[in-house]
């Protein structure tokens, strides 16, 4: 969610980082402590954070602020926030620290292997300023879009302020937590105050599905494209997907693609062994998706067979995915001219050194970053990936000719 443009503030490539809400009265009910923070009695940084939360709460008709269990902050790559974002963060870091657990999204580079990625010295220096500011703020340096795989895993029913689109979908849909898709500044403000405005998906009745989507079957490897299609069909409506029987890793890739093509941060699903009750009384439309549609989508996103880069790990690879790929590649030989990136969190990287060693024979196993937020356009023009989310962002943010392949197809292409 981006903070709206104001009449006296021109549009820019980073509008949310230019916005500074004015001192104001609010229609929300604030506690005495919250009023004191808004008045500046707790310091400049907490005052600005409270002003931002109050502004958003008023925009969306929230009645109050509610405590959160954790925050997950985006706006970590210099590529995505620019110089304006650095100034915003450095200002905040001088005046405030977070009051609840808060983790950080991927950076624009691997902190230890940035040279191997072809990242320039100027980018690295500016990225280092972002890292220092977040550390000063007390944000946990997980640098991953899958914080739930690295220790920041919420429980069912907990309220969160998470910004990463794929993580919010996973938290809402698979883990049963409650969060809107925050913007980077609003997630940081919530982390500083320890609260967020109660609106949207924090309210149970707003979490009811509005469209039923029946997928005939999902062929092996096309789960990301199922999410890609569902996001387009659902739009702003929460979809209900009967018999969506996926593994946790598949839910991760499905939700990431759905959030990239749609404007909704959760889905409801049921599978044969699942006995949870889902309120389907608000269903407005039923849509059937034949298996042939997924195959057609794969063909439309196929691109060409000439790649500069093969990129796996959007969202970041789990331990299971790293181990499964290493099992296939063990005993095989590299057989591709393209560079290869396997992107994961540092905690996953450190947990399976043998498997990482196998993958390292075929490409770079990178931490802290991914192909979406890294400055890949410096070195590459054509990228192949198994990620539905990447198919949305590689052509725009990455300026790439993107080609979709299943994970298995990519592993076969880079080995013999």
Image (cartoon, grey):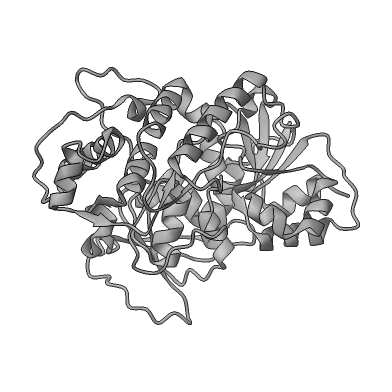
What residue is at 65 percent from the left and 50 percent from the top? 346
Closer to the camera in the image, 319 or 391? 319
Is residue 114 visible in this depiction of the protein?
Answer: yes
Q: Is residue 11 left or right of residue 109?
A: left
Looking at the image, residue 225 lies above or below residue 123: below
Count of marks, rendered view: 0
What residue is at 75 percent from the left and 57 percent from the top? 325
Closer to the camera in the image, 182 or 152? 152
What residue is at 62 percent from the left and 50 percent from the top? 345
Is residue 293 visible in this depiction of the protein?
Answer: no
The image quarter in which residue 395 lies: top right
Closer to the camera in the image, 34 or 347? 34
The image quarter in which residue 39 lies: top left
Q: Quadrant of the N terminus?
A: top left
What residue is at 70 percent from the left and 53 percent from the top? 349
Residue 35 position, x and y percent, is 14, 45
Q: Is residue 165 left or right of residue 126?
A: left
Residue 51 position, x and y percent, is 22, 37
Looking at the image, residue 76 lies above or below residue 98: above
Residue 95 position, x and y percent, is 35, 34
């Amino acid at each position: 969610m981006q903070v709206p443009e104001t009449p006296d503030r021109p549009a820019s490539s980073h509008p949310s980082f230019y916005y500074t809400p004015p001192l104001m009265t609010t229609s929300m009910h604030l506690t005495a402590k919250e009023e004191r923070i808004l008045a500046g009695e707790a310091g400049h940084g907490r005052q600005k954070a409270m002003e931002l939360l109050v502004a958003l709460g008023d925009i969306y008709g929230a009645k109050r602020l509610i405590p959160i269990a954790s925050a997950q902050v985006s706006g970590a790559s210099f590529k995505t926030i620019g110089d304006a974002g650095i100034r915003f963060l450095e200002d905040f870091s001088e005046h405030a620290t977070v009051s609840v657990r808060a983790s950080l999204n991927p950076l624009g580079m691997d902190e230890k292997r940035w040279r191997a990625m072809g990242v320039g010295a100027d980018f690295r220096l500016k990225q280092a300023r972002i890292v220092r500011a977040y550390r000063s703020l007390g944000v946990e340096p997980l640098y991953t879009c899958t914080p739930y795989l690295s220790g920041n895993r919420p429980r069912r029913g907990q309220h969160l302020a998470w910004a990463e689109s794929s993580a919010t979908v996973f938290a809402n849909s698979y883990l049963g937590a409650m969060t809107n898709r925050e913007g980077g500044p609003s997630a940081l403000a919530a982390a500083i105050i320890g609260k967020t405005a109660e609106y949207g998906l924090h309210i149970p009745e707003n979490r009811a599905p509005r469209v039923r989507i029946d997928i005939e079957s999902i062929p092996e490897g096309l789960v990301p494209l199922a999410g890609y299609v569902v996001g387009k069909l659902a739009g702003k409506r929460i979809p209900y997907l009967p018999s969506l029987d996926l593994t946790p890793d598949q839910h991760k890739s499905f939700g990431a693609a759905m959030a990239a093509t749609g404007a909704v941060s959760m889905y409801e699903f049921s599978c044969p062994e699942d006995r949870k009750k889902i309120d389907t009384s608000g269903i407005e439309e039923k849509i059937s998706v034949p298996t042939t549609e997924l195959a057609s989508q794969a063909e439309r996103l196929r691109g060409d067979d000439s790649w500069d880069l093969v990129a796996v790990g959007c969202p970041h690879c789990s331990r299971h995915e790293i181990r499964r790929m290493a099992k296939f590649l063990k005993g095989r030989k590299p057989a591709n001219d393209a560079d290869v990136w396997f992107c994961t969190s540092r905690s996953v990287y450190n947990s399976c050194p043998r498997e990482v060693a196998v993958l390292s024979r075929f490409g770079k196993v990178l931490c802290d970053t991914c192909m979406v937020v890294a400055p890949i356009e410096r070195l590459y023009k054509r990228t192949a990936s198994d990620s539905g989310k990447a198919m949305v962002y590689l052509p725009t943010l990455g300026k790439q000719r993107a080609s979709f392949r299943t994970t298995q197809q990519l592993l076969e292409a880079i080995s013999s």
